[in-house]
Amino acid sequence: MDCIRMAEESHRQDSAYLLIFIMLLTLTILTIWLFKHRRFRFLHETGLAMIYGLLVGVILRFGIHVPQSMSDTVLECAVNASPATLLVTFDPEVFFNILLPPIIFHAGYSLKRRHFFRNIGSILTYAFMGTVISCFVIGLIMYGFVSFMKVVGQLGGDFFFTDCLFFGAIVSATDPVTVLAIFNELKVDVDLYALLFGESVLNDAVAIVLSSSVVAYQPAGDNSHSFEAMAVLKSFGIFLGVFSGSFSLGVATGVMTFTKLRDFPLLETGLFFLMSWSTFLLAEACGMTGVVAVLFCGITQAHYTYNNLSRDSQDRTKQLFELLNFLAENFIFSYMGLTLFSFQSHVFNPMFIIGAFLAVFLGRAANIYPLSFLLNLGRKNKIGMNFQHVMMFAGLRGAMTFALSIRDTATYARQMMFSTTLLIVFFTVWICGGGTTPMLSFMSIPVGVDSDQEHSPENMRSTKHESAWPFRIWYNFDHNYLKPLLTHSGPPLTATLPACCGPLARCLTSPQAYENEGPLHDDDSDFILNDANVSSLYADVTVSTDASGSRTMNPKHSGAGPFKDSRDGELDPAERDVAIRGTRLVLPMDDPLEPPTTVTLPPPIL
């Protein structure tokens, strides 16, 4: 009976504590509105959520008295938590399986690929090489501090080199949500925004796989913390295998997310949502990394699946994942503030904390400055020192670092890491995030930049030449073959495949591809180039449909200039034309009075 009564009491308490978090989020939203109304940019909503979490944590820790009888009964019912921890502690798996997926998916789904791919080489360098460099720099510095702490007797438990590398991996995951929100509001230079956002998106994935590889390090023999070359190579192989496997799974799932429910937007949105979330769980169930899988699933679905959705579903999916990202992120930051007082096994060591802050600073510097120097050797649009200083300053830590540190707090070393990580997140969000606006002014970073001006023909030509040639080849292949096959948009396969593949092309080309029922709506979600400059990459094809339904295709290769905005006026008024990227599809309303007009484009330039 006591256990039954305590179960009912526990249910009421759980409801009350969830209500506390909902009230925290409500209060955060109202305060955010006030800050936006007053144009107050010093404190972002995530920092505000952490402050409210701290206040609630103080109240729950020192203002609520738990009767001793209740504590005894809880322990008798085999609830594995202390009373104070039971009040406010969630299972760490909740963060990984419920709260992290919408945050990571939204990062990929909302990615502005035009600016992202224009800087793809630099972003990959910062995300992969930079994260690995940061991990080892932090790990080596922390190992020096830990060794010194052992000598002076300031270490109360085991702390090995692998623990230092693990700490370096988890604090190398940047989450500059505060900075990016201010960048977006102030309309900061799009290349700086793309570099920071792209690095933060990808290095979260690299950090979690890197931390898993460190944990998987198992040398032969009794000493599991000794150095062994084969064990290092095995961990490196695990890193490559897990990352590539998760990447492939995410892309494959994103490509396979076809929906034939355009007439039922609610069902279509529900199916899209479930397929997206299941990617994360499928990767975790297969022993891979769900963060990597769901990130690239989001990027792939935004590039392909988004164009197959109905207009209602496109709007709903964007708003749905934006809302889930906002709520999950603020919930995590609120919980960060709360755990500072609710967690019962904190280990705060001043020497370790000082070393951690120094190591994080030097690790970020070793990431940004040397790699920027090397990248500038091959970039036409150089990364200026003012940009580098802002990137160094904007290396905040956030949700991913917290989630990785709280997942395992069983040992003395992991408990010390978790406590120190909380302080690092608090400092970077409040101090670095709050100082973003003064930093931009001090570094003379241009603000108020209109990204729409990037669509001008001059900027598009610059974009094309700045992009690496492998990616220009990929865009050509993607536009002519993958987009028509997977999204029913772009030139029909009957126009792009060789004549010998005619039967296969007709089999794979859907009626929507001819009727242009799946046009590309989201300019930022497509190629680096827009319609104004696509002529520089693709030869033109005109597909004409007469009243009887027969089709004629007129490929043209010419050195003529690019499309003009007035080209629509060149068509006969009796015809209805639809512009597809690189293709002209002419659908006459009635019998045409004259042959369909053909628009020419220059041959491909690779």
Image (cartoon, rainbow, N blue to C red):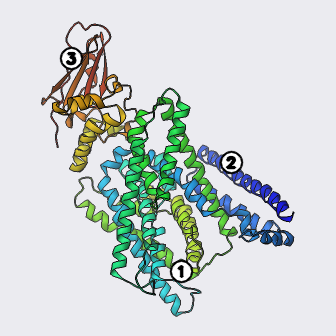
User: Comparing marks 2 and 3, which lies closer to the viewer?
Assistant: 3
Left or right: residue 169 versus residue 529 is right
Query: Separation of disc 2 and disc 3 at Cα?
Result: 59 Å
Q: Is residue 120 left or right of residue 354?
A: left
User: Residue 47: in sight, yes or no?
Assistant: no
Point out the frontmost of discs 3 and 1: 3
Residue under label 3, please give it. 597
- Please state which amino acid type lies under the numbered disc 3: Thr
Measure the alpha-carbon separation of dots 1 and 2. 36 Å
Inspect this view and state whether residue 114 appears: yes
Q: Earlier in the sequence, mark 2 or mark 3?
A: 2
Label disc, if present, on residue 26 of the rendered structure: 2
Q: Nearer the viewer, residue 486 or 491?
A: 486
Left or right: 156 in relation to 306: right
Read off the residue under disc 1. 352
Residue at x-position 27% and y-position 32%: 532
Q: Amino acid at mark 2?
A: Thr
Question: Which of the 4 image quadrants contains residue 75?
Answer: bottom right
Q: Which mark is residue 460?
A: none
